[in-house]
Image: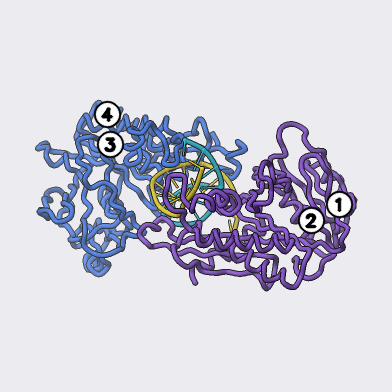
Chain colours: A purple, B blue, C cyan, D yellow
Amino acid sequence: MKYYAVRNGHKSGVYNNWSDCESQVKGYSGNQYKSFNSRAEANAYMNSGSNSNSSRSSYRSSSSSSGSGSRSRSSYSNSSSSSRAPYSNSPSRSSYGSLNASSSSSYGSSRSSYGSSYSSSSSYSSSYSSSSSSSSSSSSSRTVNIYTDGASKNNQGAKQGKSTAGFGVYYGPGDSRNYSGRVTGEQTNNRGELYGIHKALKNSVEESKSSSNTKYFIHTDSQYSKDAITKWGNSWEKNGWKTSTGSDVINQDVIKECRDMVRTLKSKNVDVEIVKVKGHSGNHGNDQADKLAVEGCSK
Amino acid sequence: MKYYAVRNGHKSGVYNNWSDCESQVKGYSGNQYKSFNSRAEANAYMNSGSNSNSSRSSYRSSSSSSGSGSRSRSSYSNSSSSSRAPYSNSPSRSSYGSLNASSSSSYGSSRSSYGSSYSSSSSYSSSYSSSSSSSSSSSSSRTVNIYTDGASKNNQGAKQGKSTAGFGVYYGPGDSRNYSGRVTGEQTNNRGELYGIHKALKNSVEESKSSSNTKYFIHTDSQYSKDAITKWGNSWEKNGWKTSTGSDVINQDVIKECRDMVRTLKSKNVDVEIVKVKGHSGNHGNDQADKLAVEGCSK
RNA sequence: CGACACCAGAUUGU
DNA sequence: ACAATCTGGTGTCG
């Protein structure tokens, strides 16, 4: 399933087929639209506006809902570029681990968890155009999308200690928070992925000291990292960080710190969500983070 | 490392540096010489003489030995060329898959593959070469060089079934065995490469019914095809044709038939060797095979 | 066994 | 510069 986000058109919103999307952008001068593999990605695009997502707020976040609800937010805005055609391919998923004890776990998520949404046929309605922001009574709810990635050079020779690992964190074009770093300790791809998320969380904790009402989406293509932090970590905390086969959990130093930071943010009422995205699928943010990660290998 | 084949000079042979070569051709009217990336290529040039490589034989291979063993024994001998240049280590491997049970394999792989070839010094002097032929007391040992190549048009749209693949087999100018064909089944570049080798093997099996004491060199630029037939195939036969990641081996139909034909030839004491050559490097045989392969895409 | 990454090599194309 | 066809291997977990 593809998602077409129309940021600037006759009627902005996210559509699930090309023809609906086309009718909204065709003949609309200065239109802005793009296709994505996941709803979260499409939402991120809607939220990002034309400039990066730092100071200017202007847009609004869309709290989510699950399956059938409606939603969406337009908030468009200005500026140049345009275009975009559909491309890309497959699915991806997300979900959300509990992590936070309080959640009754049973099905805790409630978080957007789109992803599984497209079960079979129809599922959810095409479009939903703009509905207004509504929901949140408070004023400016801010959304920040952070893309992280890990890389390793010569990973083949990891066993012989011949590899180097780096990580990248990307917020947007020219954003001063974009970062490229070298991993310390074991030089593995997975450690690189974790370091990226770690850095993103660290930044978020810092930022949340001076601002609030922000929701952070941390995008990673590493299922391993996401599960380690939000799912497996829950069991590991209870069993003394032992793997299912009895061995010690690797990279637990980084994983623990990530979990701590997530807790810190939650305690301040700052939302964080780790979103799984498909790697190398023409995703701009992921691509940029990848470049930064590769650079990090040589530091 | 480069190899300089002097086909016509003060003293013909294959040299491993330019100065030695230059001294043999400088001032020699009507000289013929050329540089190559591999010994096998240089030998092929020597063999091809001015006309193609069908009837006239001549030439001998210099068997050598590997690492530390005895060494040297240049059995050369006869015929025109004569002489021999000292060369030292060899690049481009040309290992030889076991495939045939008899070979003791001990020296499989040999990572060298050029690229890294110019690594250090020493180590092994390739050779391969005739092996069997030597033993035979008989007279005329014949060598046939066959160039194969695969091509695909619109390979980008392979997934959408928009590509076509062809293959070419080249023996020499005006040779009636030169062939251009269209691939059946999946239209991919790799399948094209395999088909070229398949056709060359098929021809060789047929020819070996009425002639003997021939050594066939099948030149391909596809590392994939060479490894599939002579290296990976050994493992695949044992593990039920599963890839290292657990999926089914693609193109196994063609690969199996190729391996069968190699066995058939070996059983008749006919030598076959698949030689990896660098693509698009001004290699005449490879270039011609390429043209035939491209033609094949449109059949 | 499954999943997601990270690399390495080769080729074919636009 | 890009993409597609192919392989081998490691990082990690359930």
**Amino acid type shown at disc 2:** Met
Q: Are marks 3 and 1 in contact (CB under 8 Å)?
A: no
In the rendered structure, the answer to whether residue B225 lies left or right of residue A251 reads: left
Quarter occupied by residue B148:
top left
Residue B14 at what x, y percent from top left? 23, 58
Return the residue at label 3: B99
Q: What's the residue at 81%, 61% (across, down)? A: A141
Return the residue at label 4: B264
Residue A10 at what x, y percent from top left? 90, 51
How far apart in space, not on screen, are marks 2 and 3 (Cα)?
58 Å
Q: Secondary structure at mark 3?
A: loop
Q: Are marks 3 and 4 on the same chain?
A: yes
- Can residue A194 be seen from the camera position used here? yes
Q: What's the residue at 27%, 31% (across, down)? A: B263
Q: Are marks 1 and 2 in contact (CB under 8 Å)?
A: yes
Q: Secondary structure at mark 2?
A: helix
Q: Earlier in the sequence, mark 1 or mark 2?
A: 1
Q: Are marks 3 and 1 on the same chain?
A: no
Dot 2: within a 10 Å radius of its alpha carbon, few (fewer than 14), some, or many (20 or more) residues?
Answer: many
